[in-house]
Each structure stands twice: as structure tokens, then as C-alpha cells.
């Protein structure tokens, strides 16, 4: 494999990091030289640095890249990136991200890049996550929720990406909470069924809810990387990259 994939979300907290880590881990196990990036992350304190998304990606593939290269822009407050940057009187520079990416990518056959929030999250005045995605020119995997609201979020994301002519490899739906009732299960099933008919791209999932994720990240991601969904997702990424 050559190139990379950009993992974005239809919203925040939908499981981007889990999926990005599983993709990177799967590829490494298959003998692909793979690197990771989480160019922008908010809500990261010095004491919580080891639990950051960037650190989890780094640890999952046992990368020796500096954390500052994997995540060039890190902010303490758990706000939208633009607001977090303004609170620290800093600016997110897409040119800096590209320069760091070029340095990292020379070491690898394939890069897994995780975004921040959804595609219209502001990074700077008049600059959004979708502008960052467009610069990489990689196929996108959009991660969303399988619960109520997931259809609208996924279709809006797909529509926006298509307007920018950004290739979409697949949509992956996650259980962001356990489906305990019959109504929950019906909502989830119909979300998947409708999206598979209307999305116009492969739709995988729903991937199961993981209640112990923060404590057992490596074990749970390793298990996910062995699933048919991730294997088929890699195939979809390859097709989209052609």
C-alpha cells in the first residue's frame, strides 16, 4: 500500500481514535510500514498527555516518532480547535501540519491521519477541518454513530465531502452507547439499513460499544483490528485510492 487515509468524524466522540488505531495496527501486522498523525487535539493537559489520542495512536503501533510530530498542535482546553487556539493566543497553521507530515511520511509506506471533530469544525478564521482533509488528498473514512441522528450526520458529511470532490472510502458506524432496549436496537438497525441504501459508499458496522475502552485500549483495539469490518475497510480504502 502507498499513500494514506484520513479518518474523520460525523461528530465528536464517535470513535475516530479507536478506528484509526485499529487500521494502523492491522496494517502494521500485515507488514505495511505505517505512520500515524493526529495533527490537532484539544483537551490535553500535561498530566493527561499519555492518555491523549495522539499518544494512544503512537503506543498502538509502537512508533518512535516524537509526540510533537504526531500532534503538532495540542491545546489544553476541551474546546473547538479555533477557540482552544485563541485561548492560548496561538494559531493553527495548515502549512506547518503539511511540513511535519512530509517529514514523517518519508519514513512510511502509508499514513493514518485522524482528524478532530467533524469536517466543519473551525480551525482558524475561514478554515475548517475539511480544508485540512483536502490538502492531504487521501480517501476519507467517516466515522459516525449508529444511534438516532446517525443518518443525518453521515449524509451531511458525505454531501460536504463530495462537494469538494474528496474521495470517500467508507462510512463506519459505532455504537457510542449500549443498545439496551428493543427500540434502541430498532433505531440502530434502521440507521444501518437506510445508510447502506442511500450513502452511495460502503457502510460498515455497527461496531460494538466498548465500555472499558479507556482502561483496555490496546486489547480492545487489537480485537477490533482482527474483525471482518476492519479487513473489509482496508479493501475499501485501497479501492478508493486507485
Image (cartoon, rainbow, N blue to C red):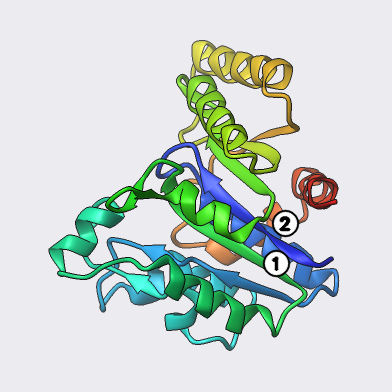
Comes first in the chain, label 1 or label 2: 1
Q: Nearer the viewer, residue 89 or 174?
A: 89
- The residues bearing labels 1 and 2 have C-alpha atoms spaced at a distance of 7 Å
Residue at the image point whose x is 15% and y is 69% from the top: 89
Q: In the rendered view, does 207 fall on the left or right side of 91?
A: right
Residue at the image point whose x is 56% and y is 52% from the top: 134
Callout 2: SS: helix
- Total marks drawn? 2
> Is residue 11 depicted above or below 186 in this figure?
below
> Is residue 139 depicted above or below 154 in this figure?
below
Q: Nearer the viewer, residue 6 or 191?
A: 6
Q: Position of residue 86 (x, y in %)?
A: 17, 61
Q: Position of residue 161 (x, y in %)?
A: 58, 37
Within 10 Å of disc 2 (Cα), the crowding (few <14, some 14-19, many 20+) is: many
Is residue 77 visible in the rendered image? The answer is no
Q: In the rendered view, does 85 fall on the left or right side of 133?
A: left
> Is residue 156 depicted above or below 103 in this figure?
above
Callout 1: SS: helix
Q: Are marks 1 and 2 in contact (CB under 8 Å)?
A: yes
Residue at the image point whose x is 41% and y is 75% from the top: 72
Q: Nearer the viewer, residue 194 or 174?
A: 194
Residue at the image point whose x is 67% and y is 23% from the top: 199
Within 10 Å of disc 1 (Cα), the crowding (few <14, some 14-19, many 20+) is: many
Q: Which residue is mark 1?
A: 25
Q: Which residue is mark 2?
A: 225
Is residue 89 visible in the rendered image? The answer is yes
Q: Nearer the viewer, residue 94 or 119?
A: 94
- Residue 79, labelled with which disc? none
Quadrant that contains the N terminus: bottom right
Q: Position of residue 171 (x, y in %)?
A: 65, 36
Amino acid at each position: 500500500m502507498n499513500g494514506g487515509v484520513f479518518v474523520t468524524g460525523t461528530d465528536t466522540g464517535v470513535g475516530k481514535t479507536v478506528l484509526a488505531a485499529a487500521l494502523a495496527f492491522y496494517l502494521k501486522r500485515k507488514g505495511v510500514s505505517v505512520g500515524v498523525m493526529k495533527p490537532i487535539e484539544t483537551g490535553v493537559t500535561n498530566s493527561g498527555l499519555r492518555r491523549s489520542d495522539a499518544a494512544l495512536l503512537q503506543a498502538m503501533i509502537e512508533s518512535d516518532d516524537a509526540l510533537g510530530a504526531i500532534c503538532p498542535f495540542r491545546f489544553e482546553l476541551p474546546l473547538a480547535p479555533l477557540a482552544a487556539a485563541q485561548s492560548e493566543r496561538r494559531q493553527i497553521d495548515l502549512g506547518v501540519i503539511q511540513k511535519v507530515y512530509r517529514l514523517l511520511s518519508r519514513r512510511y509506506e502509508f499514513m493514518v491521519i485522524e482528524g478532530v471533530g467533524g469536517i466543519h469544525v473551525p480551525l482558524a478564521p475561514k478554515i475548517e477541518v475539511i480544508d485540512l482533509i483536502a490538502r492531504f488528498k487521501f480517501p476519507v473514512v467517516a466515522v459516525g454513530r449508529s444511534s438516532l441522528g446517525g443518518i443525518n450526520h453521515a449524509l451531511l458529511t458525505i454531501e460536504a465531502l463530495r462537494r469538494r470532490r474528496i474521495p470517500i472510502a467508507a462510512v463506519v458506524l459505532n455504537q457510542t452507547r449500549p443498545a439496551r432496549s428493543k427500540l434502541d436496537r430498532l433505531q440502530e438497525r434502521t440507521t444501518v439499513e437506510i445508510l447502506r441504501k442511500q450513502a452511495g459508499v460502503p457502510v460498515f458496522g455497527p461496531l460494538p460499544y466498548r465500555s472499558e475502552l479507556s482502561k483496555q485500549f490496546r486489547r480492545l483495539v487489537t480485537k477490533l483490528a482482527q474483525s471482518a469490518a476492519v479487513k473489509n475497510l482496508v479493501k475499501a480504502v485501497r479501492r478508493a485510492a486507485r
